């Protein structure tokens, strides 16, 4: 009788992937990245173990969105004080901090617990084409769309 394989942290081999966000749709890109960060693309995936890989996203400033989201999508956060609601549109956020747009989208697709925070720490997003992870020899990630 065979026993079910249970992933262990010591058995996980992590790879580095690089993704070029030029011309990619925000949500589709974020879901692919979240899948790799969670490790769901591997046969050894387990929901209680971080089996994911590292992902580097370059050219975050060149992503696309469909419809009128550039003007109508609003990011909001609250300072905690009365009248402390701060809002910014997607267009202004892309001008100000384009890497935060992708980080926000991916973070919403990861688990909301300590394991999700650990997975999110393996994401590195850069606005331009340069990144500081050449020593890790990242492979180009083939996207499904």
Image (cartoon, rainbow, N blue to C red):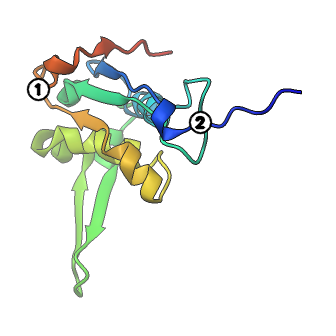
Q: Quadrant of residue 123?
A: top left
Q: Residue 97 at what x, y percent from top left? A: 14, 44
Whether residue 90 sits left or right of residue 68 in the image: it is left
Query: Which callout, 1 or 2, points at the residue further toward the start of the chain?
Result: 2
Q: Residue at x 38, y 15 (%)?
A: 141
Which residue is nearer to you in this view: 37 or 91?
37
Q: Do we see residue 60 in this rendering?
A: yes
Residue named by callout 2: 7
Crowding at label 1, few (<14), some or many (≥20) Cα neighbours within 10 Å? Answer: few
Residue 122 appears left or right of 137: right
Task: Kindly identify which numbered label has been placed on residue 109.
Answer: none
Q: Residue at x 30, y 56 (%)?
A: 75
List x then y, in percent, for residue 12. 47, 30
Q: Is residue 63 visible?
A: no
Secondary structure beneath label 2: loop
Spatial CA distance of label 1 from label 2 is 30 Å
Residue topped by disc 1: 132
Q: Quadrant of the N terminus?
A: top right
């Amino acid at each position: 009788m065979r026993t079910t394989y249970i992933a262990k942290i010591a058995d996980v081999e992590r790879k580095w992937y690089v993704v070029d966000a030029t011309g990619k749709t925000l949500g589709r890109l974020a879901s692919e990245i979240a899948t790799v960060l969670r490790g769901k693309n591997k046969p050894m995936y387990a929901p209680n173990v971080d089996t994911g890989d590292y992902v580097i996203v370059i050219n975050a400033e060149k992503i696309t969105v469909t419809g009128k989201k550039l003007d109508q999508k609003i990011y909001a956060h609250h300072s905690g004080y009365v009248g402390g609601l701060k809002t910014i549109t997607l267009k202004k956020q892309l001008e100000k901090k384009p890497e935060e747009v992708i980080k926000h989208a991916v973070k919403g697709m990861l688990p909301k617990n300590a394991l999700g925070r650990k997975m999110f720490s393996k994401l590195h997003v850069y606005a331009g084409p340069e990144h500081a992870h050449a020593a890790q020899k990242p492979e180009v990630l083939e996207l499904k769309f």
